[in-house]
Image: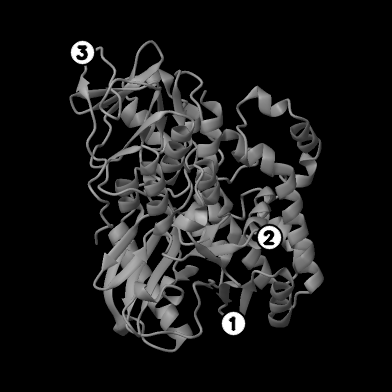
């Protein structure tokens, strides 16, 4: 298993010894503008690099891996290509915006198609329905397959839209940690409507009030997994998530999810950003509570600002380990989001009943989340997400075959016996899919790769392998995420899924936007 390698261009950088007082330009000459260093080439780090380059900064990105993208990477194995991480693409306007800022036509560099059918849902009792992008078609699909009225579906999505309109410009688009955010009239209006964001009951409780059919409650509860949370604990404010998918749509990049990374890296490089791969940062160097640059082994690279795209827990415990007095201890002790176990299977068959996105629900959703969050283990009957990019990008698999990305939600790594758990999960998943699809899946697998919480942590510096930083299982979770700027260290900023506003591609891109607006 090996992620795609970028070209070696941009790997060279200028550095000097720790005792040098000269400042080095990323271009190798005399410094003409302010220098920004970004730690980590995850999607938020790349977006931050683009935004700062457009503002006139000379930008260098230092990445420990030999490839960019962080979780948004790919695997090539025996003729199969897999998008290794995020597989659902929503809010593409945030990617387009980066090209627009640089004065480029997004469609000349990056293209995607809107999905008519977003996801197929399969239930243990044999119920099947398709979630369509068109709300009327979706309501019809649900009403025809379950004991649910179209009116209740419409009411549910109207509630989701209301929460979005109250929270978007305050909680997502701006920093919660700046006074100027609260001096805006639209913020005041949103604050006056906070009672309408449904923060005082759980998602599950809210969804039970919208739907009488337990199958559709389960469908609505699933959206908590979009940010690694538990619908039986997370506030119903998270019912904003369906609006992001249903109203704005779900998409598929023409060249696969990893093309989001490659196209943005190409854009950044065209703006003069230098990517340095295979360069793990050892320390953020401070001078009297001011970030002055980074240390690479015995070398020092000076900068005017430093932006960490590394998980905030590792940023402090690895890069600022010399300064434990500066740790935001309460934030770093918060409950982590869930993680994932992913099997990448090359399958020697095509299945007409499957689409790009497919969900096979467990029989007992509450027990499944109880296993993850209370017992810190895997459910014996997990819900299975199956993504097949070769449905829309046939070259991702050999002729007559499919590339299966098979994922279940699991707890963050706290020392579980993962080898035993993975073996049991594989057996359970294969048995369930074989029974539901009417064929022995194991006999069709000709290649396999596995990603689990341990490898997620080691490959992406995500503490405990959590996918979204901290969980959103509390009423005040949105207010407790780490800010995008340090309150104690001048010129130190943070972006990515472990800080405000949250995890996933859209929110990670918004974290880069917030950082760029904070940086002068």
Pick the front one: 362 or 237: 237
Look at mark 3 in the image and give the residue it sits on.
19
Residue at horizontal 72 percent and vertical 69 percent from the top: 135
- Judged left or right of residue 319, residue 354 is right
3D distance between C-alphas at marks 1 and 3: 69 Å
Look at mark 1 in the image and give the residue it sits on.
125
Q: Going by the picture, which residue comes out furthest to the bottom?
A: 438
First in sequence: mark 2 vs mark 1: 1
- Is residue 288 visible in the rendered image? The answer is yes
Q: Quadrant of residue 82?
A: bottom left
Callouts 2 and 1 close, C-beta under 8 Å: no
Q: How many marks?
A: 3
Mark 1 or mark 3: which is in front?
3
Give coordinates of residue 46: x percent, y percent. 41, 42
First in sequence: mark 3 vs mark 2: 3
Density class for disc 2 (Cα within 10 Å; few <14, some 14-19, many ≥20) is some
Give coordinates of residue 509: x percent, y percent. 51, 44
Circle 2 — which element? loop
3D distance between C-alphas at marks 3 and 2: 55 Å
First in sequence: mark 1 vs mark 3: 3
Residue 278 sits above or below residue 158 on the image: above
Callouts 3 and 2 close, C-beta under 8 Å: no
Q: Quadrant of residue 502?
A: top right
Circle 1 — which element? loop
Density class for disc 1 (Cα within 10 Å; few <14, some 14-19, many ≥20) is few
Pick the front one: 170 or 9: 9
Give coordinates of residue 407: x percent, y percent. 42, 65
- Which disc, if any, is residue 247? 2
Mark 2 or mark 1: which is in front?
2
């Amino acid at each position: 298993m090996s992620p795609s390698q970028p070209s070696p261009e941009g790997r060279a950088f200028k550095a000097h010894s720790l005792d040098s007082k000269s400042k080095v330009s990323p271009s190798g000459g005399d410094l003409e503008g302010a220098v920004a260093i970004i730690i980590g080439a995850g999607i938020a780090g790349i977006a931050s690099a683009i935004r700062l380059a457009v503002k006139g900064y000379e930008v260098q990105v230092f990445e420990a891996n030999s490839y960019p993208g962080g979780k948004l990477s790919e695997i090539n194995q025996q003729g199969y290509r897999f998008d290794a991480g995020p597989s659902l693409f929503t809010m593409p306007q945030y990617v387009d915006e980066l090209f627009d800022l640089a004065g480029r036509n997004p469609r000349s560099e990056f293209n995607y198609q809107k999905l008519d059918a977003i996801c197929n849902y399969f239930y243990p009792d044999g119920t099947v329905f398709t979630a369509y992008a068109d709300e009327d078609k979706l309501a019809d699909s649900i009403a025809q397959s379950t004991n649910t009225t179209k009116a209740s579906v419409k009411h549910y999505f109207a509630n989701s839209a209301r929460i979005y309109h109250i929270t978007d410009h305050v909680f997502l688009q701006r920093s919660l940690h700046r006074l100027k955010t609260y001096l805006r009239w639209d913020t005041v209006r949103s604050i006056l409507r906070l009672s309408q964001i449904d923060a005082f009951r759980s998602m599950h409780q809210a969804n039970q009030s919208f739907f009488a059919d337990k199958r559709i409650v389960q469908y609505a509860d699933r959206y908590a997994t979009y940010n690694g949370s538990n619908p039986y604990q997370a506030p119903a404010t998270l019912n904003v998530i369906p609006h992001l998918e249903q109203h704005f749509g779900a998409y598929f990049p023409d060249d696969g999810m990893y093309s989001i990374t490659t196209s943005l890296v190409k854009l950044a490089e065209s703006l003069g950003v230098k990517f340095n791969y295979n360069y793990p940062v050892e320390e953020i160097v401070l001078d009297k509570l001011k970030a002055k640059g980074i240390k690479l082994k015995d070398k020092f690279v000076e900068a005017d600002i430093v932006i960490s795209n590394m998980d905030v827990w590792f940023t402090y415990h690895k890069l600022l380990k010399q300064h434990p007095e500066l740790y935001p201890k309460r934030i770093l002790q918060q409950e982590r989001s869930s993680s994932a176990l992913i099997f990448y299977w090359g399958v020697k068959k095509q299945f007409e009943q499957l689409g790009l996105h497919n969900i096979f629900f467990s029989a007992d959703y509450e027990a499944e989340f109880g296993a993850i969050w209370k017992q810190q283990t895997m459910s014996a009957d997990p819900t299975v997400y199956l993504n097949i990019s070769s449905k829309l990008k046939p070259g991702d698999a050999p002729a007559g075959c499919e590339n299966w990305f098979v994922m279940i939600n699991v707890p963050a790594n706290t020392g579980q016996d993962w080898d035993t758990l993975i073996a049991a999960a594989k057996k359970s998943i294969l048995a369930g899919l074989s029974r539901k699809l009417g064929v022995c899946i194991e006999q069709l697998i000709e290649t396999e790769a596995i990603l689990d919480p341990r490898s997620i942590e080691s490959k992406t510096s995500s503490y405990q392998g959590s996918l979204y930083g901290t969980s959103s299982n509390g009423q005040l979770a949105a207010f407790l995420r780490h800010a995008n700027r340090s309150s104690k260290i001048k010129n130190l900023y943070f972006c990515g899924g472990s800080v405000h506003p949250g995890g996933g591609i859209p929110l990670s891109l918004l974290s880069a936007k917030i950082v760029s607006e904070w940086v002068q």
